[in-house]
Image (cartoon, rainbow, N blue to C red):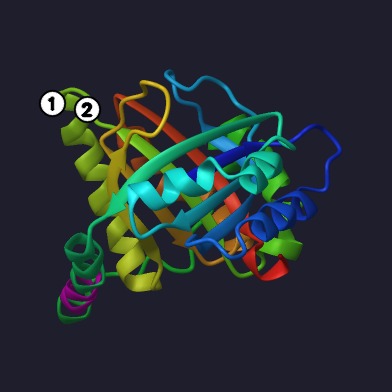
Amino acid sequence: MLTFLAASPGTDIVSEVRALRRATEGSQAGWIYAGKVVVAALHSAQIGEKNWSAVVLLQYPSREAYERHAESAAMRAALARFEEVYVQGFRRSPFVNAMIPQLLLAMRVAQIVGRRPSHFPFRRTQSQDVPPQVEQLSRRLSEEVEFGAHAIVIVNLIKRGTREQRSADRRYTTAMFSAMAEGGYGPLHVGRPVRVERNYEFDAVALVYYPGVEFFIDLTRSEYFQAIYGDKQLGDTQAVITVPILDRL
């Protein structure tokens, strides 16, 4: 279960998520990931513009186990500390998640055999060509070096678009996978959505790892990324950039 949490301004989000973790002790919930939200890079038309504070990924052996835990007094009390909570279920596909590293490895072998030029280090695009929102994101990411020096995780809820949008998005994904294959980063968890609450419709859930805030800043400012980003076209999406805090709980 993927849980998006919005805390009141000024709240110590690490302490609040730590309290949530204590509420899961003795349950069947397995903590897979916890992240402090840096920013929502893309807002969903369905969910709206939310100021999420944290995202937590818990694993349960069954839907019934989740529902029993969600109805417990301890869990309800822990979640009541937040201003807003949204739970998005998803079923992780063992086959797809096993094949992604194999695909990236095959792409890397093809790059080496074909003597293709390296993506790294990224070549920074001219400053006048960088959209203002990219510079704003860079400043915000720079504030999260303490937690995000070595990793950030982008949590994506994805609804595919029209045939034309899907074609463009495949070009974007292929280009991104090319750099991921060389750089050794990429999707951690991919699965199909399972509706738990509210009638939002998404086609996929993906948690994608990048090796730290400085790396991601360089990526978003690069000629490579600015040349392909226009092809990222979806019917609807929520993309939340997080830094890991599970080891702080």
Task: Please tell me in which quadrant of the rendered image residue 111 appears.
Answer: bottom left
Nearer to the camera, 117 or 158: 158
The relative height of residue 81 versus residue 29 in the rendered view (above or below) is above
Residue range (magenta): 104-110
Label 2 element class: helix
Please state the horizontal and vertical placement of residue 44, each as a whole percent of the image.
45, 25
How packed mark 2 is, by other alpha carbons closer than 10 Å (few <14, some 14-19, many 20 or more), is some
x and y percentages locating residue 32 in the rendered image: 49, 63
Q: Is there CB contact under 8 Å for labels 1 and 2?
A: yes
Q: Position of residue 123 (x, y in %)?
A: 49, 58
Q: Position of residue 20 (x, y in %)?
A: 67, 52
Residue matched to label 2: 165
Task: Name the one closer to the observer, 237 or 25.
Answer: 25
Q: What is the three-letter code of the residue carrying label 1?
A: Arg
Residue shown at 66% from the left, 48% from the top: 74
> Residue 57: which numbered mark, if any?
none
Residue drawn at (31%, 31%), measured in percent from left and top?
A: 202
Residue 138 in view, yes or no: no
Q: Which residue is mark 1?
A: 163
Q: Is residue 106 magenta?
A: yes
**Quarter of the view holding residue 115:** bottom left
Left or right, residue 56 beside residue 169: right
Instruction: Describe residue 233's horizontal placement relative to residue 126 as left or right.
Output: left
